Amino acid sequence: MRIHWPQILPALLVAFLAACSQQEEKAVVAPVPVQVAHAVAGPIHRIITADGVLWPLNQASVVPKISAPVRRFLVQRGDHVQRGALLAVLENRDLAAAKTESSGQLAAAEANYRSTAAATVPEQVTKAETDVTAAQQAADAARTLLDSREKLFQQGAMARKLVDEARVAWAQANSNLVTAKEHLRALQSVGKQEQVKGAQAQVEAAQGHLQSAEANLGYSEIRSPIAGIISDRPLWEGEMASVGMPLLTVMDISSVIARVNVPQSQIGYIHIGDPATLSTDSGEHGEGKVMVVSPATDPASTTLQVWIQAPNPGERLKPGTSVHAAMVVGSVPNAVIVSTVALLPSSEPGVTAVLVVAPDNVAHLKPVQIGIREPDKVQILSGVSPGEQVVVEGGVGVENGAKVQIVVPGEKAKEEKQEAKKEK
């Protein structure tokens, strides 16, 4: 059979063009597969995020109060210690000798005080009383002699010279009596008390010297002011520990403090006690609360510092580590919420939009105003109502008014597997 190609070729060309046209029309009108989720009404939290650095809950640089060589250390870096634990001992033989000397001085002062209070003063008072009695007797005798001679002088039986001598003797005896009485009075009132006070003052001074020696000896024992972990020990045994130079550093990392910087525009939402989550680049996490909100702005960064305290069981969070903080600072109880993956850039600058699928499976691009954000959801202030279907996957590149096919999550992957099997 002979084929007439000049007659068949035009018919084949027409059929081929018609088939191509049908395929192009089918490709144009084919619906785009998308996944949707309903906009819901529910609570959403206001979360403020910031970056910062972890600090220990407490830290103490242990500085010696005396300069002396280190005799021995009782701890190493990384050791856990309790408050008051002995960390190191400095050379203290000279201080121990000074304490012994001060103890001897105190014992001598106390012995002198007991002697003064119990023996010396009473003996002096007794002697003064005896002196007064003797002076009184001498004065009385001198007065009697003077009176007798004056009578004899008046009778003409004695010379005036003898009378004058008796008067002088009486004056001297009376003066001695006054002196003895004054001495006794002084001993009984002021003198006795002053002597006892002087002896007591010597005891107190000796006690002060002993306390000073004991304190200096105590300074040679370095103890931890807080409970924590030894983070630094710059010296070795035998090296000189100097006043003002840290001998050890103790950190309390049972809890950590995240110091983060927050912009001024967001600081008004943050309050002490707000819950927060901390996370590090290594994947460690911690739950804490805001404990400090700085009242002053850092002039260099124009931010304010917020402190977040978080328990640190197992000491997983290390001071000095960079940390990301998410603070929950408020919530809206009945907000319109969609997934954050539903947000699409609009053709207008600064405008956000979402694709809403109508009951006839037609996608409509709607500009929306957004409010509070969480990592996986966002509040819609206007543009979407609860119950509407919002495209959450496959919406990029879909034009406004395009026909779409709603695909249930998981079915698309199942269809792709079936197609792959058919091709094999």
Image (cartoon, rainbow, N blue to C red):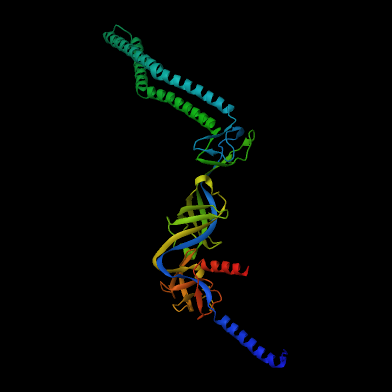
Residue 345 appears in view? no
Of the pair 386 and 32, the residue shown nearer to us: 32
- Residue 202 percent location from the top left of the image: 46, 25
Question: Quarter holding the N terminus?
Answer: bottom right
Relative to 6, say whether 79 is above or below.
Answer: above
Farthest residue toward the right? 2
Position of residue 371 in the picture relative to residue 136 (left or right):
right
Relative to 218, say whether 138 is above or below.
Answer: above
Farthest residue toward the bottom? 7
Relative to 25, say whether 57 is above or below.
Answer: above
- Residue 396 percent location from the top left of the image: 55, 74
- Residue 322 percent location from the top left of the image: 57, 54
Of the pair 371 and 340, the residue shown nearer to us: 340
Residue 210 appears in view? yes
Q: How many marks?
A: 0
| Residue plotted at (53% across, 46% down) | 315
Question: Quarter holding the C terminus?
Answer: bottom right
Relative to 238, say whether 277 is above or below.
Answer: below
Of the pair 189 and 160, the residue shown nearer to us: 189
Farthest residue toward the top? 157
Position of residue 405 in the picture relative to residue 273 (left or right):
right
- Residue 353 percent location from the top left of the image: 50, 75
Position of residue 85 in the picture relative to residue 18 (left or right):
left
Of the pair 235 and 338, the residue shown nearer to us: 338
Q: Quadrant of residue 423?
A: bottom right
